[in-house]
Amino acid sequence: MNRNSDNPLHFDILDSKPRVLLLSDDEGVLASFTANYRGQFEILTTDCPFDAYNFIEDNSIQIVLADHQMPTVSGVDFLEIIARDYPDVQRVLVTDHCDMQIMLEAINKGKVGGVLSKPFKPLEISNVVCDAWNRFKELVEKEVLMKQLQRQNQQFEFLLRQRMLS
């Protein structure tokens, strides 16, 4: 899932569980999330934004959940960087203060596809992550289809040139 790669993502990643990264400075949230959802998702957790950023490419992360209130960088700012560098990775903001200003920043800057409020509701987490997973799969499928169409167009152009020359 190299951010600068021209190679299409392969469908084999879509046959596995979604790879979810949770960035939070709350050890209880990290432990609880891992314990409750390790059966549904492949989970990585960290309290360090620098590590989280590196985990994305190193582990082909597909969905990032970022806590809004972090000591060194806000969740919105972190998700904004992810949106820029890894546009296919789906982004979800985790917050315990769901005010309109935070929501607008999350949508406009972080290009989030979902917001989770604390305390977590198990069904809500499953729904938000599944929605993000579906959006990710649609992007991958679209990318693969676009590459196939480009290849077919190149073949068609080649055949037309051959016909015009003969």
Image (cartoon, rainbow, N blue to C red):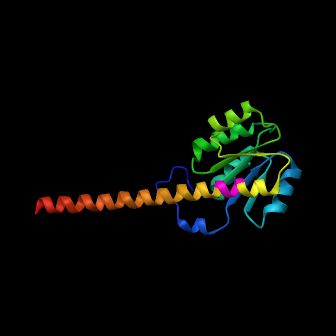
Instruction: Count all numbered tags in the image, as a single digit.
Output: 0
Residue 84 percent coordinates (x, y): 58, 41
Where is residue 142 drawn, in percent x and y?
A: 48, 56
Magenta segment range?
A: 128-132
Dominant SS of magenta comes to helix
Could you tell whether 129 is left or right of 144 in the image? right
Foreground residue among 9 and 123: 123
Can residue 22 be seen at all in this image of the molecule? yes
Tell me if residue 62 can be seen: no
Does residue 45 lie above or below 14 as drawn? Answer: above
Reply above or below: 35 against 80: below
Q: Position of residue 81 (x, y in %)?
A: 64, 40
Check residue 25 for magenta coloring. Answer: no
Which residue: 44% across, 60% down?
145
Q: Nearer the viewer, residue 128 or 44?
A: 128
Name the residue at 26% across, 61% down: 156
